[in-house]
Every structure is written in structure tokens, then in C-alpha cells.
Amino acid sequence: MEANLPIVESFHSLQGEGAHTGRSAYFIRLASCKVGCPWCDTKASWSDKKYPRKSVIELSKNASKAHSEGAAFIVITGGEPLHHNLDPLCDIIRKSQTIPIHLETSGVDPLSGQPDWITLSPKKHAPPKLELLKACQELKIIVQEKDDLRFAESIAKQVMSIRDELPFLFLQPGWKNENGQSLAFDYVKRNPAWRMSVQTHKWLNID
């Protein structure tokens, strides 16, 4: 049977966050998330019941078209994309084209798909799996309150204890959260190992 996945949306735009901010990218947003962050800005993606399922062949063809139009990489996001087995999708993408595959995940599920770049955004109430801490290239902590800074420090220490080299470390204020913005700004000023990430796509009012 041909593999398929529940798709909230897919689109060609610019990466708005983290280490690859400003680069052309093709996004595939998968439905389903059981992590349940109360401040989530994509709550519409939590259920996979109301979205169409698309074949990995169709998704790969659309990604290939975006690549030909300038997309530098593919971003698989959600929802929580690792609720799904990403091997079929990533395998067929790699068979049809040479384009890096990026994954954005909270890390609560086992890793699949062998992505080229992993943005790990762990949550206090749903700790990430060790294999994701070992594999990620980018660690992004959302800052809503002061306790999120303590969580960021604890995660960074955990990563340091299991790796020879740290991933990029980002603090990202929750959208329209002035307290989170102030906390992240002040912390990064005092801690040069960390960088501040802002959701530039929202400020620019683009997808």
C-alpha cells in the first residue's frame, strides 16, 4: 500500500526562525500533535482527523517542483512530525532529488527519516528522547516565563554531558509575549553561547 500522511498545508516560503532564517524553503506541515503546549500557535494542526491524507509520491513531486523554483531545503514540521514514520517520505524525496531535509520536532518520539538537519524544540512537560539530544544540530527553547530559562540551562547541560560539540543554542520568545521577549533578550546578552531567534515570518506577515 502506498504510504500517505495527513497534511495541514505545504508551501514555498522563507524559513523564519533559527539558524537558517531568511533562506528559501519548502514546508510540509503534518497533522497530529499530542504534546499539548497551551501557548502553541499551530493548535489547528493537533488533530489529524480533519485533514486530507496525501501520498508520499505527491508530496515528493511538490517538493521537487519547489526545489526547481528555488527552495534550498525541505522543512518537515507540524504538529509533531515524529508522531509519524518519516522513512517513506524521506526515502522517496532522496530518490527523486538532491535536497537537504530539515526536521522541526519536540523530540518526544523516536527519530525516523534520517533528516540532514534537526531543529529540536523540547518542552518542559514532555522531555525529548536522548537520541534527539544527540542528533540535533539546533536546540531551540521557547521562552514564556523565567522557568523556561532554567529549563534551557538544564537541557544545555544535558547535551554537553553526552556530546563533544554543542548544537546551535537558541532562545525564542513566545509570540506576542513581552515578558518572554525581555527574558530571552537579557539572558542572551549575558550568555554568549546562546542566540536569540525571532519569528521573522510573522513580523513580515508572510507564510
Image: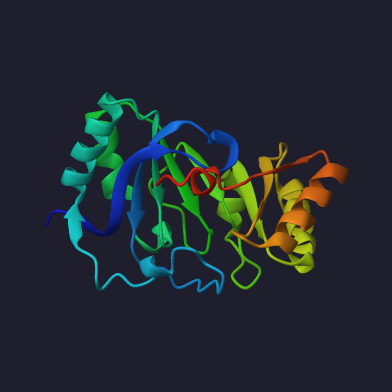
By what rule are the colours in the image chosen? rainbow
- The residue positioned farthest toward the left in the image shown: 1
Residue at point 22%, 45% (across, down): 59
From the image, which quarter does the N terminus lie in?
bottom left
34 to the left or right of 11: right
> Residue 44: horizontal and vertical position, in percent?
37, 68
Give the camera-side residue of 65 and 107: 65
- The residue positioned farthest toward the right in the image shown: 190
Counting every numbered tag in the picture gives 0
> Residue 3: horizontal and vertical position, in percent?
19, 55
Give the camera-side residue of 32 and 24: 24
207 to the left or right of 52: right
> Residue 177: horizontal and vertical position, in percent?
66, 62
Residue at point 50%, 74% (across, down): 36
Residue 179 placement: quadrant: bottom right
Give the camera-side residue of 200 and 127: 200
Image vertical order of residue 139 relative to residue 145, above or below: above
Image vertical order of residue 103 relative to residue 147, above or below: above
75 to the left or right of 120: left
Image vertical order of residue 13 relative to residue 122, above or below: above
Residue 138 placement: quadrant: top right
> Residue 108: horizontal and vertical position, in percent?
52, 64
Residue at point 43%, 61% (across, down): 80
72 to the left or right of 147: left
